[in-house]
Image (cartoon, helix red, strand yellow):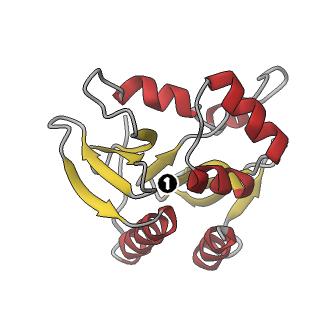
Amino acid sequence: MYEFIKQEIEDIYKEDHKRLRTKTVLYGQIERRWHTYLHPGLTAEEIEQFEARTGTRFPSAYKKFLTFYNGCYLFDLLRMGGKELESYKGLSIEETTRSTVDVQDIQGIYLRKRTPKDHFIFADSLVHNSYYVIDSNENVLEVDFRTKKVVKMFSTLKEFIIEVIKEGKQNLEDEVYFEFN
């Protein structure tokens, strides 16, 4: 279902990639930094343990995504959380800084008392000043950081990711790159 992401990314970046010992694959080295990375998926047992640890029942679309990728970073546009590494012992700085951001950390940044109980926060974008939630109907909602208003809605997680990839491709064609300090 989500294997298309890797195929699209590989078509875009061709041979411009690097595989880390953690099995994370970095793509698109632009101005001495990597533009996109995909983390290896989790097993069903790992996802169950992750849900138990967080005390959260994940939306089915997100759980399915986790079987393909344990989070990702796409085109500097999207940071999608997953399960962080059990240990950073022995990892290089690159492996540590390019590791999965824990979805609980993303939730900790954006979750507020007024956040609807059925909103599962799973990703964010510094470029769009937004964070992303999956609601009880499995819609993906783009929520503005400041106003907390929904600015876009996607009917599925797959549709949302396809739109991010389209925007990322267009930015590459237009040579639009983002600087983060």
Identity, as a three-letter code, of the amino acid under mark 1:
Glu
Image quarter (top left, top right, bottom left or bottom right) of the N terminus: bottom right
Tell me residue 174's x, y (percent).
33, 75
Label 1 sits on residue? 31
Compare residues 149 and 86 and report the one nearer the observer.
149
* Residue 84 visible somewhere in the drawing: no
Tell me residue 62's x, y (percent).
58, 51
In the image, taking residue 125 as reference, residue 114 lies left or right, namely left
Tell me residue 110's x, y (percent).
35, 29
Quadrant for residue 148, please give it: top left
Residue name at image x 40 percent, y 39 percent: 118
Residue name at image x 74 percent, y 40 percent: 47
Q: Under tag 1, what secondary structure?
A: loop
Image quarter (top left, top right, bottom left or bottom right) of the C terminus: top left
Residue name at image x 51 percent, y 67 percent: 158
Residue name at image x 75 percent, y 37 percent: 48
Tell me residue 124's x, y (percent).
40, 43
Compare residues 30 and 165 and report the one nearer the observer.
165
